[in-house]
Amino acid sequence: MIKVGIVGGTGYTGAELLRLLAGHREVAVTTLTSRKEAGLRADHLFPSLRGHCDAVFSAPDEAALAACDAVFFATPHGTAMQMAPALVEAGVKVIDLSADFRLKDAAEFKRWYQLDHTAPALLEEAVYGLPEVNRHAISNARVIGNPGCYPTAVQLGFLPLLEAGLIDASQLIADCKSGVSGAGREARVTSLFCEAGDNFRAYSVPGHRHLPEIQQGLRVAADGPVSLTFVPHLTPMIRGIHATLYARLTQPGVDLQALFESRYRGEPFVDVLPAGDHPETRSVRGGNQCRIAVHLAPDGQTVVVLSVIDNLVKGASGQAIQCFNLMFGLPETAGLDAPGMTP
Amino acid sequence: MIKVGIVGGTGYTGAELLRLLAGHREVAVTTLTSRKEAGLRADHLFPSLRGHCDAVFSAPDEAALAACDAVFFATPHGTAMQMAPALVEAGVKVIDLSADFRLKDAAEFKRWYQLDHTAPALLEEAVYGLPEVNRHAISNARVIGNPGCYPTAVQLGFLPLLEAGLIDASQLIADCKSGVSGAGREARVTSLFCEAGDNFRAYSVPGHRHLPEIQQGLRVAADGPVSLTFVPHLTPMIRGIHATLYARLTQPGVDLQALFESRYRGEPFVDVLPAGDHPETRSVRGGNQCRIAVHLAPDGQTVVVLSVIDNLVKGASGQAIQCFNLMFGLPETAGLDAPGMTP
Amino acid sequence: MIKVGIVGGTGYTGAELLRLLAGHREVAVTTLTSRKEAGLRADHLFPSLRGHCDAVFSAPDEAALAACDAVFFATPHGTAMQMAPALVEAGVKVIDLSADFRLKDAAEFKRWYQLDHTAPALLEEAVYGLPEVNRHAISNARVIGNPGCYPTAVQLGFLPLLEAGLIDASQLIADCKSGVSGAGREARVTSLFCEAGDNFRAYSVPGHRHLPEIQQGLRVAADGPVSLTFVPHLTPMIRGIHATLYARLTQPGVDLQALFESRYRGEPFVDVLPAGDHPETRSVRGGNQCRIAVHLAPDGQTVVVLSVIDNLVKGASGQAIQCFNLMFGLPETAGLDAPGMTP
Amino acid sequence: MIKVGIVGGTGYTGAELLRLLAGHREVAVTTLTSRKEAGLRADHLFPSLRGHCDAVFSAPDEAALAACDAVFFATPHGTAMQMAPALVEAGVKVIDLSADFRLKDAAEFKRWYQLDHTAPALLEEAVYGLPEVNRHAISNARVIGNPGCYPTAVQLGFLPLLEAGLIDASQLIADCKSGVSGAGREARVTSLFCEAGDNFRAYSVPGHRHLPEIQQGLRVAADGPVSLTFVPHLTPMIRGIHATLYARLTQPGVDLQALFESRYRGEPFVDVLPAGDHPETRSVRGGNQCRIAVHLAPDGQTVVVLSVIDNLVKGASGQAIQCFNLMFGLPETAGLDAPGMTP
């Protein structure tokens, strides 16, 4: 059994790691930390885990974590970069679900997160955990910066087009809609049932932290500069992200369907829908799939890509486990083979 | 009291007409028709109306309708164009909430609705009921083609930019999200709670009936050709439309906020939010307002307009009453002066 | 115009007072207080009020409040009992939406709210603001203890049976379901969209603060002791309470329908549904009605009463305005005459 | 591999069988029938199954079904009783998720379902598929009448009390709340998002088909007559049943917590919560657990039991697979070992 530690298991991504790892036959969660809930059983906080998880929250303890084979960070940004260097030194594989190891440019990190990066060397070494792009590097990585939820949905939707050089990279649009769990389990007025329920709104149009992360990934795919307008919205559902992507075709007569099918052939977690289809978020609820459809708009020039994921699975904990599987030479789908739950 | 008839009062727009007209002091609903529910009290079908409406559904009766001062059609398309000519002949003002009198081009109507238009002369005469554009014409009209829900939100959002000639009209994008009531009260699997709930999806990307209606309006505003990519989505809420509009600025240094405030100054039902704000659909839940915010995206070139309405009010029955008020020389806000309901 | 002050207008009952009073022609809100939000416009916090309310939050100021004709308290418990005595002294009518003036027994108040009552004389004088029971006393009152949401729905459902002495008062059951707005606008994990959404649970089975309030009212109706089991539940909707009440008939052959219709004949806000019907909460969404249906269960001995209200209207702000209207000799329905909003 | 057929796989219980069986390592679904959808791939109707199920709907074919080891009926009532006799004759194990084999009394069946029972001999032989009561009989059964959703939640909650003879069986109350998926995937106005959403209501107070089924089970547990008042309600969530049960204790001083823990010790799918707790439906969302808490109400005489299940899993398809596992000598939890999904 591979010994796994989870730092910060009281939020939704922590709970989701526990749920998914409960079904992973090669893993034992040996350490689960929370400063605030130390002493509490995890299944008291999340009764859905009763009978499936007997972990107890403990205060973070470097020795206990260093004894793990792998440690997941499900913490707010700023924590993993403090603790990761010692763990890596001790031979522990680190998978960080926060933003600490996503942006390769420490200055960019500081600009968007208002923190000096305290582990710049490890940042440089860290691999961005998007297996559909970096599978080989992930397999050999010591530290993974696990992608954000919006960035996962948006990048997987744009990649085939950018890699093939078929669209105008200077005017990309990503109109994204997220379920409320994307805002986490913190007590905030804007996340209340009576504020977010039966309601729809955009937010952060002037600038959102996921914008630089997305652009960083798209630049690699485009092998050149890109310019993206990214507008996130809050939609009254619990899980799910729906990215609607718009780009201008620069070449006529492209077989978009074939392009996408070819790019993702063999990918265990990217599912290109039949031509003309529209993915729905519930088709991936609880599952690690990204479902994608590609359309040419009636104007004959605008490509519209529809990309859906479960923000807590492929957009967070599931993708982290996918990276973990690669790092430990396990089947990539271990612990991730359940279909989405509909209805 | 102005005598009002409603044809087809068993759907959501019919119910909403009854709710709003119950608070309109100048109106008496004298005829309410439904072939299917003839004999039933309206407040049996909609118990929220108990104590506020004693109307009884009757089979459509031309004489009873001809005795009204105004008749609203809250029917599927194809009905109003059959019945309107005789009513207009009889001196009755007609306000059609269906699509029959929206598209000025009968061929375009046939293409999207698969019906030959049976009242082409009246179609030519009909006024498109968007008071913010056609206030004067509406006041003098005999027949109103009441705008669709998406078209209302999208046109009000693009108008200031197109009228001022500030954007590239050849690459407009409208990413729209609708509550489920937009699909009506018909029993359909896709509208079930367990299909539409906790779920998000796009639909009709290859082409939606509201596209030609929107383009028709935008062409007038632009005084020239326009090309629009329109992607509607279904969001798990009951009422509300959120249109997120994207356009490329063709001139630098425009004061977008001033432009919008100036365009809509004095409009009773269009509310331009302060700079930097994001409207939410619940702020207009049950009310006739359209709330709009305008942003310049971080790329400095893409204008992002956020426009919200209640699809059943400003997107249907409220706007119809607004037109009715204009046609009868009443204060434009009569019966429409309640604020939205939050939470 | 009657000058009205509102203390604590940042929660849902405060916002609802503002919404309803915006449509009340005899009222001007002259003072609106909030320690935390002083200086902020109310319509900034609640954009649905834009165009309908230009009030600005101010720090509580006794002189400004004393200059009002009436003051509503939409505060947590403990505030009104501090401020009310001086206001009453100054001739201001006080309507308290919190629990401070509901329980006639100060010891009981202390037991459930962990506070010594600081205005016991005023507590003795205060009238319990349930117009269907205390209409005359309310008209002449200086201080109103406005009923809680559950207590309103439960009392109106049991009253006809208890007053007529037809049920066993020693084994009453109230199984109640509340929308999440009943928990207020405070940032709490349990009220988050992702905690309360798509979920159903009971709470406080061992004892809830509304139990003594309900029992106090039922004792008066029964003219004797009562024993009630009260189980509240949280249901994933925004507004609404549904009380399902169970009692054992002590007499055979009672015409329950006639009993209820007779008890509530002429009541402007209690609507007894036709025999066999089931009220739904959305039929009173946004309205001040209580809708009730009464059934005899198949066992022939158990009466089942179904009683629904909007917790923020008849269960709070609407009922407070109903009391206000009585206190100022206005039509009881002033500002409260809108039907519920369906869908 | 055990060859399994599913008759009627287009509804929610059929889809849920496919979802759960996709994770069952001993099962191959070899036949999937639907008259209406013959020729369609199951994963076209339920895209969440893409990659996990390549079954195609076929018209019902007795030979294909007779070649299965077991057949599940996920059909409306009236179908299984027609087809089961021939299958049983052919040696196929039958598990019927409809009501055809639940009520032992054919006259009672006719009264509530308006159909003559066409397989009375098989009805007599059939075993009621509640493993916590009939585990041994299920293991040896040829035909299972799989319990209804409400009956499962209610019986598991009352059983310990009735078996121990601790409550007055003549005045039981079950106040039950169901998610909307309980109404199935048929297109009905009352199941629409805009009718069932943000709304709460009781239904069928005068009599519901699950009443005789529940009473039949409770009579066995009580070893004598019982009288139950059963009130079902519709709550705006997708999955889940919450049963709130009320009974009068006939003996003082009972240790209710110990009673329940003892009754369900060792049960793989009944989880008695710690004293004082309240189960929530989402804790069993997607899982086969029944979670139960037992309370003594403040009156000291009324027992309140809270019992939650996922209506599509323990209330239908999960329980059917639990029976199937018993019938084929498999571990009872095979294919059912995933925790519920929270949030």
Image (tube, coloured by chain):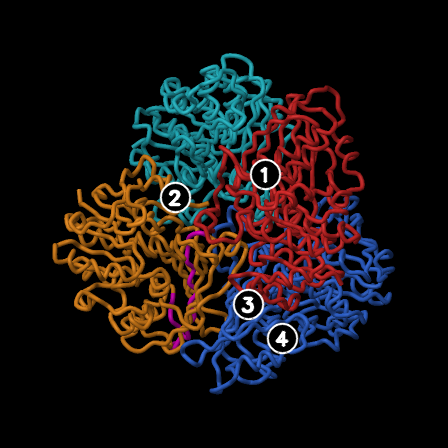
Chain colours: A blue, B orange, C cyan, D red
Image coordinates for residue A281, horizontal then vertical, percent: 56, 62
The residue carrying mark 3 is D40
Eye-nearest disc, 2 or 1: 1
Q: Distance between the residues labelled 3 and 2?
A: 41 Å
Which picture quadrant has residue B180?
Answer: bottom left
Q: Indicate the chain on which mark 1 is placed.
A: D
Eye-nearest disc, 4 or 3: 3
Asked whether, in this view, residue B155 is left or right of residue C143, the answer is: left
Question: Element type at marker 4?
Answer: helix
Can I make out residue D343 in this image?
A: no
> What residue sits 37% from the left and 36% below the top?
C30
Image coordinates for residue D71, horizontal then vertical, percent: 66, 56
Up the image or down, A342 lies above or below A56; here it is: below
Asked whether, in this view, residue D140 is left or right of residue B312, the answer is: right
Local crowd size for mark 3, using a 10 Å CA cut-off: few (<14), some (14–19), many (≥20): some
The residue carrying mark 1 is D106
Can I make out residue C253 in this image?
A: yes
Eye-nearest disc, 1 or 3: 1
Question: Element type at marker 3?
Answer: loop
Q: Do labels 3 and 2 share a chain?
A: no
Asked whether, in this view, residue C133 is left or right of residue D144, the answer is: left
Q: Give the range drawn in magenta.
A: B238-256
The residue carrying mark 4 is A217
Image coordinates for residue C88, horizontal then vertical, percent: 42, 22
> What residue sits 53% from the left and 81% below the top?
A256
Q: Distance between the residues labelled 4 and 3?
A: 39 Å
Quarter containing the C terminus of chain A: bottom right
Local crowd size for mark 4, using a 10 Å CA cut-off: few (<14), some (14–19), many (≥20): many
Question: Element type at marker 1?
Answer: helix
